[in-house]
Image (tube, rainbow, N blue to C red):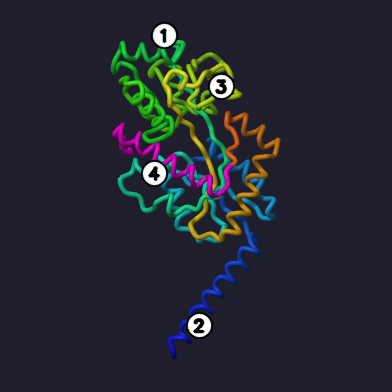
Amino acid sequence: MTILRRRWLQLAGLTSLAASARAGAQAWPDRPIRLVVPLPAGGAADVVARLIGRRLERLGQPVIVDNKPGAGTNVGVQAVVTAAPDGYTLLVVMTASAINATLYDKLPFNVLQDIAPVAGLVRFPLAMVVSRSVPAASVAEFVAYAKANPGRLNMASAGVGTAPHMAGEMFKAMTGIEMTHVPYRGEPPALADMIAGRVEVMFSAVAASIAHLRSGALRALAVTTAERIAVLPDLPPVADTVPGYEASGWFGVGAPKGVPVEIVERLGREVELGLADPATSAQLAELGSTPLRLGPAPFGALMAAETEKWAKVVKTSGAKPD
């Protein structure tokens, strides 16, 4: 066989593969789509996934939300990384993945390399919440109180490496205060101990703590976003006192690397339309979140920027997974 003939057959094979991929993308979807949430059912990620999943059913197929918690979200992420890149397995990507990239010394995947960004979903704020026993009505007063009582305050979190934990560690680093980190298995038990006065401060997801704030069981000093938020309009940003501080969680949609670009773009358009829907926006607002309208490239840029940002916080804090 001549070199020219071998080259012709190679090109023909590549052309055939490309044609098959285009045909598959055009026929997609012809069966149910699985949307993996790497956290237990009932939390904010699960609620958001079900909201956007209903929107994606406009594609003509059921969307099944599959909760796969474990190892700080790594179990669910691994399930998607190893899935076929055919558009039938998607992932709710979240802040935890950006944190875990540095928190864990060794992972069987690299989210930035192995997950294709599809679209941003929402950004959700945290609130700096204190127990009623803390004699501080502002961030400045809290910092002064903490410096006057070094090491005596306990900072709760939803677990090592979670967004509430890292938000607190960043606050400690930027203010120079000392607090003892007390990790819990999720926010509900942490907030319960806050109400009981066993721990003094927590950087809590607004969706988790807002009922306690409204009842007066706990007190919020500020929000962690760069600007005020609609559900707690009277609270100033932490950055008003600690310049440059910003910490918020986010969710988006990803897929296994290699999914045809036509499918990624179509999914991105459907997510965008879903977030623009007034009913969906209203439901997301009830969770204290705001739509994160980002297409594949901008969402990928956010994932990369957040991974770099939290890497610095993880290294400074010395945090290690449980």
Are the residues at dot 3 and dot 4 in contact (C-beta closer than 8 Å)? Answer: no
Are the residues at dot 4 and dot 1 in contact (C-beta closer than 8 Å)? Answer: no
**Residue 299 painted magenta:** yes
Cα distance between the residues tagged 4 and 1: 37 Å
Kind of residue sitting beneath label 3? Ala
Kind of residue sitting beneath label 2? Trp
**Residue that mark 3 sits on:** 211
Determine crowd level at label 3: few under 14, some 14-19, many 20+ residues with C-alpha closer than 10 A: few
Q: Secondary structure at mark 1?
A: loop
Q: Is residue 60 above or below residue 248?
A: below
Residue 293 position, x and y percent, is 60, 41
**Residue that mark 4 sits on:** 71
N-term mark: 2 or 3: 2
The stretch of residues the image draws in magenta is 294-322
Residue 266 position, x and y percent, is 63, 54
Residue at image coords 43%, 23%? 243
Point out the frontmost of discs 1 and 3: 1
Cα distance between the residues tagged 3 and 4: 29 Å
N-term mark: 3 or 4: 4
